Image (cartoon, helix red, strand yellow):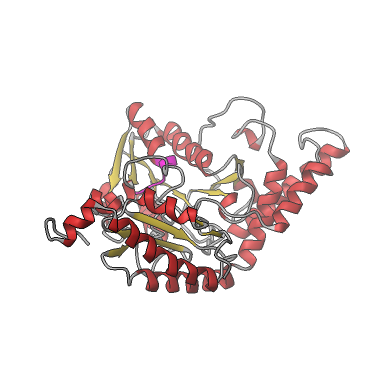
Amino acid sequence: MDTTQEIYLDNSATTRVSKEAAEKALYMMTECYGNPSSLHSKGFAAEKEMTAAREIIAERLSAQPGEIYFTSGGTESDNIAILGAAHAKKRAGNKIVTTAIEHPAVLNTMAQLEKEGFEVVYVQPEADGNIPKEKFDAAIDVKTILVSVMFANNEIGTIEPIAEIGAVCREKGVLFHTDAVQAVGHVPIDLSQLPVDMLSLSAHKFHGPKGVGVLYAKRGTPLHSLICGGAQERGMRAGTENLPAIAGMAAALREACANLEQNAAYVAGLRDRLIAGLETIPHSLLSGDRKNRLAGNVNFCFEGVEGEALLLLLDAKGICASSGSACTSGSLEPSHVLLALGLPHEVAHGSLRLSIGEYNNEAEIDHILETVPKVVERLRDMSPVWDELVKGERPHLI
């Protein structure tokens, strides 16, 4: 392949907007641009489009339109779900259960609740990122009012047993929220069967626009609004709706769900090809569950390599990747997810996340497999730590 061509393998951070979603958003900006709250023809047309988008999203999730609330994205959806439910239920108890490997949108919201006097329990994962339902059964007590667990991990791709955890919550009468930002559009989700009270999603993870998302809240779920203002979103989320993005999101989700099985099979094939190739690099480690993981997620640690240096050299060769969550990639600290899996700091620092999408192809994967081993070797040649490992002056950790 043309080695000057850019290869984008950071689809867990964001995706290219699909043609259908972009065209729909443009139509809403240039043709159907009325305020959906306005009492005239342009407003009525806009309101009709918003209703249609809500119905499309509800249908794809097997939910009811009245259970769909439009937000600015996954972070806001997580905040409304966690803060809104905690404040609504605080008279019933003050304990919340989550996991140590959540996205910062959840972890930092939990930290805020701790400052307000809530007790937060952080359940630890197994070495592959799985968190069995038994751990939640043990953590939930009479004071527990909310459990929040990520559907699929954004860094290591492990898919959690959401149905089983939700069943435990239902049995104990505790609200259950899942951050499904990485899962929606990539994993089948049927909310008519899944024991979930609240679910967060973000459009830009499945080829929709940035800055728009959804909070699903099962009918009857107690929530307090976080934003004061108008009566939009049935009083839950004030402010004029971002209708171009909402319509684009609905178009993207409809497209993603229509091709979900086909795309997942194709992307998983590329993933497995990439994993098999990268595992030939000495002292490398695949993070996350080998089988029960997102179709497009590949996360490796390379001993004796700094993840930031690895990213910079790959970027110089036209390869766009990540060392973890895009929301924390500016931090010099190693991934909290990898540390929670029990990996040493020295190993966690050398992480590389390659997240594949349906726009990628085998030629790109083969080019990655030619490039990454050479870059790892170059960085190890420059590393005093690797020199000590080779000389036996310190033990290998992987």
Task: Report the residue at 33% width, 56% height from top.
Answer: 379
Magenta residue span: 100-106
Image position of 80 (left or right of 311):
right
Q: Quadrant of residue 266?
A: bottom right
Based on the picture, tell me whether residue 382 belongs to the magenta stretch. Answer: no
- Where residue 206 appears, as percent x and y from the top left, is 58, 56
Task: Report the residue at 49% width, 74% height from top.
Answer: 269
Q: Residue furthest right?
A: 41
Quick one: 11 or 25, which is closer to the camera?
Answer: 11
Image position of 142 (left or right of 215):
left
Quick one: 376 or 105, which is closer to the camera?
Answer: 376
- Could you tell me which quadrant the N terminus lies in? bottom right
- Could you tell me which quadrant the C terminus lies in? bottom left
Q: Residue furthest left?
A: 393
Quick one: 280 or 40, which is closer to the camera?
Answer: 280
- Where residue 167 appears, as percent x and y from the top left, is 39, 57
Image position of 317 (left or right of 108):
right
Quick one: 89 or 243, which is closer to the camera?
Answer: 243
> Can you see residue 373?
yes
